[in-house]
Image: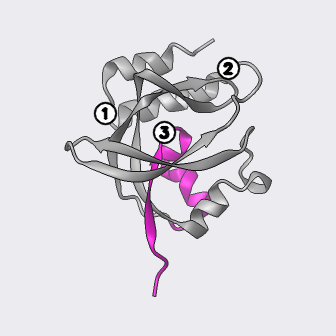
Amino acid sequence: MSERRVQVFFYGLYMDFAVLRRFGDIPEVWEVARLRGYDFRVKSWGYIVRSERDTVYGTLVGVTHTELARLYDPATNGLPVEYFPEPVLVETASGKFVAALCYISAVAPEGAVNAEYVDKMVALTKKFGFPEWYTERVASYRP
């Protein structure tokens, strides 16, 4: 019997399945979704913060707890800050509301804006067909 998958909202480079495959056999099944009440920001890495007026776009993906443990293990993932799971309610592109986990950092990553990260994120926003205003918002972080 295979391990049960839970819905996870990815909003950063984990939207890239080439990145995800390094941490497990995560199926390339996704759905575009948005998370209201948060804002996406970039320093050395992407992160989100609560915001009454903003929305974060991302992908909704079924992931096992074993895969999540690998993805968010500070000893192996190379992320500059530790991310913790929080329950959220996302809205899919088809208008369906789905309960999901979303990994959020308690602190912002330090350092200057990572231009390579921004470029990869801009490419992902285009790949998934996020609204043009959102792509422009992400691109505005370029140094």
Who's the residue at 33% across and 31% down the image? Answer: 130
- Element type at marker 1? loop
The reply to whether the C-beta atoms of the residues labelled 1 and 3 are less than 8 Å apart is no
What whole-number distance in Å separates the C-alpha atoms at marks 1 and 3?
13 Å
Residue linked to disc 1: 129
Residue linked to disc 3: 11
Q: Specify whether 66 is left or right of 97.
A: right
Amino acid type at image mark 2: Val
The reply to whether the C-beta atoms of the residues labelled 3 and 2 are less than 8 Å apart is no
**36 and 113: which one is in front?**
36
Who's the residue at 24% across and 41% down the image? Answer: 93
Pick whichever of labels 1 and 2 is earlier in the sequence: 2
**37 and 95: which one is in front?**
37
Quarter that holds the C terminus:
top right
The answer to if 73 sits in the magenta stretch is no
- Image spot of residue 102 (x, y percent): 51, 47
- Element type at marker 2? loop
Q: Is residue 90 above or below residue 56?
A: below
Residue linked to disc 2: 113
Range of magenta residues: 1-25
Q: Specify whether 95 is left or right of 128.
A: left
- Image spot of residue 74 (x, y percent): 76, 51
Q: Residues within 10 Å of mark 3 (few under 14, many from 20)?
A: many
Pick whichever of labels 3 and 2 is earlier in the sequence: 3
| Rendered image: mark on residue 95 | none
